[in-house]
Image (cartoon, rainbow, N blue to C red):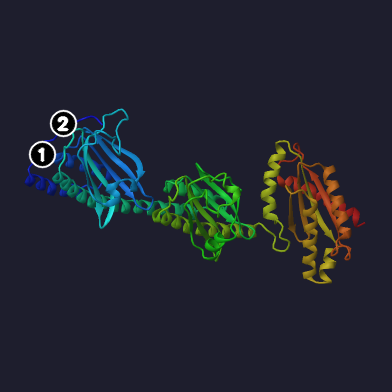
């Protein structure tokens, strides 16, 4: 800090009149940045303030942060941290007077490294309702620039500043909560409109990162038992999607049985962090909140910070509200997915139905028009009506399920098998030729002869095949009609 000339000292009466003015000024200032400057400006009116700083104290983390300092009239908004318990003023809650420290460097140097060190200083705690909120200090480059009266005056300013800072903090908290409520309401509407279960986790983590100054967020979905898998993740410490976390032990008791959040203050040393995740969580802190869908815990919402013991009640409150929104959105998306699956699934066999087949064929025919091979097979069960009428319809349903299962198991996973209606089924063979389809049908026929339900009843199948011809065919209906025509030829030959 550069030296400054002394400020002429007012009389005691003048000081206390100024103190009253300061009280009115500070309590009427609500913006924190404006308040810092007002505290400095009003202090400099009555005390020499060649150097000046304001530090705020977080007792839970024992961290003091210099949020404002001034050097001979040049003020700055800064954030310089140090251990709060290292400060005698913060630790004891009493003011301090340094008459001359020319032989040592200042305990706190907030100016340039090469700048001259202040010689004398007074510092006072910011006290409010029995708690130390921080400290203010005014300094001089002259030795013995301050008296005990000056320290008493600074303490009066500090007490008023503490009230003003607490008011500003309260107003800021209310404003932050109002904005959070608006954002969460908007997020809730966005989540409610997300009917894709895979889309919901991505929107949620985006909302967490937007709302809170965290370094990472993830949505985990519970799979087999206590195993949780990362469905979506974002942030500078984002976890690899697909990572798994075994929740057995304390985590399952807290998150699944008790359905309560769990906070880990130090991820690097916590025994609850899986070994596989330690390479991604080398330090910092984290929080996990259960996502309850219906009556079950369906997953977790987690957030992480590179700072240890970062998560306070404020962050937890916001995450709990987001978790509640997420649970509702997941339930809506899963319900929609279930209804959609029912509308596209045959109730008897569990296979895709005719509507699903039509949607799939549209995509496959579009690819076939661009050059990819495509074959479809229409299957018709022979003598199924006789079988269905004699043992009964329940046995007929068993036969349909058995045949559908054979078609699926002998087909490739990328291909589709659908129930077309009655005893007719369709196999879609993408990237296949007629020769490949014939090999497929040989496997199906072999399975039919061995099936414990179909073989004793002598139920067989006729199949019509068609390969997509880009010159003569344009639509899925063209391909289906060609396969249907082949089916009737096969059945005609078979039934002669």
How many residues crowd around disc 1 within 10 Å: few (fewer than 14), some, or many (20 or more)? few
In the image, what residue occupies the spot 67% across and 54% down? 355
In the image, what residue occupies the spot 71% across and 41% down? 474
Q: Where is residue 204 drawn, in percent x and y? A: 49, 51
The alpha-carbon separation of the residues under discs 2 and 1 comes to 12 Å
Q: Is residue 153 visible?
A: yes
Q: Is residue 491 visible?
A: no
Mark 1 = which residue? 9
Which of 232/41 is in front? 41
Total marks shown come to 2
How many residues crowd around disc 2 within 10 Å: few (fewer than 14), some, or many (20 or more)? few
Which residue sits furthest right?
496
Mark 2 = which residue? 5
- Residue 459, above or below 311: below
Q: Where is residue 190 drawn, in percent x and y? A: 47, 52
Q: In which quarter of the image is the C terminus?
A: bottom right
Which residue sits furthest front?
103
């Amino acid at each position: 800090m550069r030296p400054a000339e002394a400020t002429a000292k007012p009389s005691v009466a003048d000081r206390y009149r100024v103190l009253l003015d300061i009280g009115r000024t500070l309590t009427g200032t609500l913006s924190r940045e404006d308040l810092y400057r007002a505290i400095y400006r009003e202090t400099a009116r009555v005390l020499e303030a060649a150097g000046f700083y304001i530090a705020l104290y977080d007792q839970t983390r024992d961290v003091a942060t210099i949020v404002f300092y001034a050097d001979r009239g040049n003020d700055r908004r800064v954030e310089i941290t140090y251990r709060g318990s290292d400060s005698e003023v913060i630790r004891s809650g009493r003011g301090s007077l340094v008459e001359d420290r020319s032989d040592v460097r200042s305990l706190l140097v907030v100016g340039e490294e090469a700048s001259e060190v202040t010689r004398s200083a007074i510092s006072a705690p910011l006290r409010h309702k029995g708690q130390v909120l921080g400290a203010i200090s005014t300094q001089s480059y002259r030795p013995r620039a301050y008296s005990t009266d000056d320290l008493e005056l600074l303490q009066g300013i500090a007490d008023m500043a503490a009230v003003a800072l607490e008011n500003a903090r309260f107003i800021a908290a209310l404003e932050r909560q109002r904005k959070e409520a608006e954002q969460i309401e908007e997020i809730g509407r966005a989540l409610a409109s997300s009917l894709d279960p895979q889309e919901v986790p991505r929107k949620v983590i985006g909302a967490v990162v937007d709302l809170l100054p965290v370094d990472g967020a993830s949505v985990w979905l519970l799979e087999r038992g206590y195993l949780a898998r990362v469905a979506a993740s974002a942030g500078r410490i984002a976890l690899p999607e697909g990572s798994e976390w075994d929740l057995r032990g304390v985590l399952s008791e807290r998150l699944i049985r008790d359905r309560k959040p769990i906070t880990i203050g130090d991820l690097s040393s916590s025994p609850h962090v899986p070994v596989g995740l330690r390479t991604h969580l080398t330090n910092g802190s984290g929080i996990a909140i259960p996502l309850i869908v219906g009556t079950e815990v369906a997953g977790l919402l987690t957030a992480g910070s590179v700072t240890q013991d970062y998560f306070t009640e404020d962050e937890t409150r916001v995450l709990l509200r987001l978790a509640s929104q997420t649970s509702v959105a997941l339930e809506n998306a899963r319900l929609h997915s279930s209804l959609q699956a029912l509308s596209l699934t045959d109730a008897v066999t569990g296979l895709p139905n005719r509507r699903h087949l039509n949607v799939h064929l549209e995509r496959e025919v579009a690819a076939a028009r661009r050059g990819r091979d495509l074959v479809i097979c229409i299957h018709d069960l022979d003598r199924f009506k006789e079988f269905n009428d004699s043992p009964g319809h329940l046995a007929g349903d068993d036969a349909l399920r058995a045949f559908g299962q054979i078609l699926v198991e002998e087909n490739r996973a990328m291909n589709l098998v659908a129930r077309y209606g009655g005893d007719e089924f369709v196999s879609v063979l993408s990237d296949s030729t007629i020769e490949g389809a014939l090999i497929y049908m040989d496997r199906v026929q072999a399975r039919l002869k061995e099936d414990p339900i179909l073989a004793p009843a002598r139920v067989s199948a006729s199949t019509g095949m068609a390969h997509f011809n880009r010159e003569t065919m344009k639509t899925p209906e063209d391909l289906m009609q060609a396969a249907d025509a082949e089916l009737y030829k096969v059945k005609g030959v078979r039934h002669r």
